[in-house]
């Protein structure tokens, strides 16, 4: 017999948008720089009157996990107005789940089951980081502590008890596979790859490039020291961002993921590069959100530009093989949700017993 949903859990909700409900041109408008995220979360808590809040920002989703003061007080639009001035135009891109549905959503997100790349491992760390950052700032309490801790435990169970997550299950891995497919029969062997950015996503791409064989790598980054560190790790060459257009003239593939709030590559930059290439095509893959490469660059002759949403086609082709594992993952999630509901129920019973005893003692 299932444990009934408790009043406390019905105050828990998630509101957000993701790659399914909003294209990259919408998602990038919701991006908030890392140093500002806690301040924005605190503003959200104070302005909306949430008792607890965690905000998750990734390249493929922006989600607010919160605990409302009352069950009937969950109005999504004002929440997103705290996050961005673009909120009034979000409309049908937004979704909201409450109670058990919100738990189920979080558990799937943390386990990589709601990701563009099914079973990706990076999202678990992103969920953990968002939760721990909010916890350190005392933005979470008993409910979100319990829900997020159980979600992270469940994500671990999903990975250890099923085959989900095994293999190249990341946006970076899919970007490299996509580049290989675009280049055709020879793949990435003997080709030159220019990696713009030196963060976690760039490192992930380079790890997968290394597995694909004999391709030369150039890493361009705003911080020369970080570029050199990453280039050394993967037997590549480090350059500054000022040098990247010279390197682009020789590259076969450009993969960009800088974390910049603004575009770093525009038509005026690429047009002279393509003139130097004398008709040789250039594959450009932009996995940044906000996008690093101006979409208009796709109109430059000889450029084949693909953004992060284009990768979904490649991903969809592999989903069928995971059907049995998905069923097992969902069963694990349902069991852990039941365990969490029982935990909340025990806590509620214990609290009532304490208050009743205290009342009798008066």
Image (tube, rainbow, N blue to C red):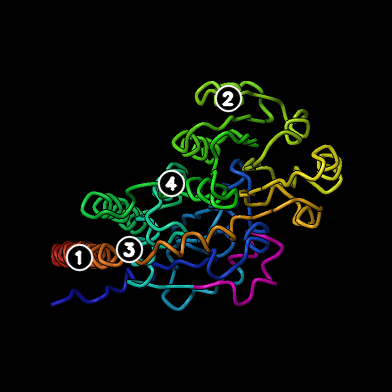
Quarter of the picture holding the C terminus: bottom left
Residue that carries the numbered disc 3 in the rendered image: 321
Residue 93 is covered by the magenta coloring: yes
Q: Nearer the viewer, mark 1 or mark 4?
A: 4
Residue 297: percent from left, percent from top: 78, 52
- Tell me the tag on residue 122: 4
From mark 3 to mark 4, how far is it between C-alphas?
Answer: 21 Å
| Residue 5 at x, y percent in the picture | 27, 75
Give the magenta range.
Answer: 79-95
Residue 355 appears in the picture as rendered: no
Decide which of tag 2 and tag 4 comes sooner along the chain. Answer: 4
Q: Is residue 302 magenta?
A: no
**C-alpha distance separating marks 2 and 4:** 24 Å
Bin the neighbour count of mark 1 within 10 Å (Cα to Cα): few under 14, some 14-19, many 20 and up. Answer: few
Q: Is residue 171 above or below residue 353?
A: above
Residue that carries the numbered disc 2 in the rendered image:
236
Q: State how far apart marks 2 and 3 are (Cα).
A: 35 Å
Q: Please identify the dominant SS of the magenta region.
A: helix
Residue behind mark 1: 335
Tell me the SS state at disc 1.
Answer: helix
Q: Are marks 1 and 4 in contact (CB under 8 Å)?
A: no
Q: Nearer the viewer, residue 264 or 37?
A: 264
Earlier residue among tags 3 and 4: 4
Q: Residue at x 63, y 53 (%)?
A: 31
Between disc 2 and disc 3, whose residue precedes? 2
- Image depth: mark 3 or mark 4 in front: 3
Q: Residue at x 42, y 64 (%)?
A: 67
Q: Quadrant of the N terminus?
A: bottom left
Dot 3 lies on which element?
Answer: helix
- 42 vs 144, left or right, is right
Q: Quadrant of residue 357?
A: bottom left
Q: Residue furthest front?
A: 185
């Amino acid at each position: 017999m299932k444990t009934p949903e408790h009043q406390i859990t019905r105050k828990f909700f998630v509101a957000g948008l993701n790659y399914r409900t909003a294209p990259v041109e919408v998602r990038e408008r919701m991006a908030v720089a890392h140093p500002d995220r806690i301040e924005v979360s605190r503003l959200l808590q104070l302005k909306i009157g949430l008792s607890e809040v965690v905000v998750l920002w990734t390249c493929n989703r922006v989600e607010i996990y919160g605990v409302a003061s009352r069950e009937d007080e969950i109005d999504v639009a004002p929440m997103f107005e705290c996050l961005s001035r673009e909120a009034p135009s979000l409309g049908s891109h937004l979704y909201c789940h409450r109670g058990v549905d919100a738990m189920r959503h979080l558990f799937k997100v943390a386990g990589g089951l709601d990701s563009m790349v099914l079973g990706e491992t990076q999202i678990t760390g992103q969920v953990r980081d968002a939760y721990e950052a909010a916890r350190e700032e005392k933005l979470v309490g008993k409910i979100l502590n319990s829900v997020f801790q159980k979600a992270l435990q469940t994500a671990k169970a999903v990975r250890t008890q099923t085959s989900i997550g095994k293999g190249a299950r990341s946006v970076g891995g899919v970007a490299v596979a996509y580049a290989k497919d675009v280049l055709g029969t020879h793949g990435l062997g003997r080709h030159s790859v220019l990696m713009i950015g030196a963060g976690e996503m760039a490192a992930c791409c380079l790890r997968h490039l290394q597995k694909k064989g004999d391709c030369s790598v150039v890493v361009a980054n705003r911080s020369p020291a970080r570029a050199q560190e990453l280039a050394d790790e993967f037997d590549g060459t480090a350059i500054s961002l000022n040098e990247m257009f010279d390197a682009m003239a020789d590259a076969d593939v450009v993969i960009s993921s800088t974390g910049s709030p603004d575009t770093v590559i525009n038509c005026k930059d690429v047009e002279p590069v393509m003139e130097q290439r004398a008709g040789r095509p250039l594959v450009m893959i932009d996995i940044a959100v906000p996008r690093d490469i101006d979409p208009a660059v796709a109109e430059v002759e000889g450029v084949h530009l693909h953004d992060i949403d284009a990768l979904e086609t490649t991903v969809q082709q592999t989903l069928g093989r995971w059907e049995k594992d998905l069923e097992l993952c969902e069963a694990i999630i349902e069991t852990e949700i039941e365990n969490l509901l029982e935990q909340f129920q025990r806590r509620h019973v214990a609290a009532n017993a304490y208050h009743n005893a205290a009342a009798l003692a008066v």
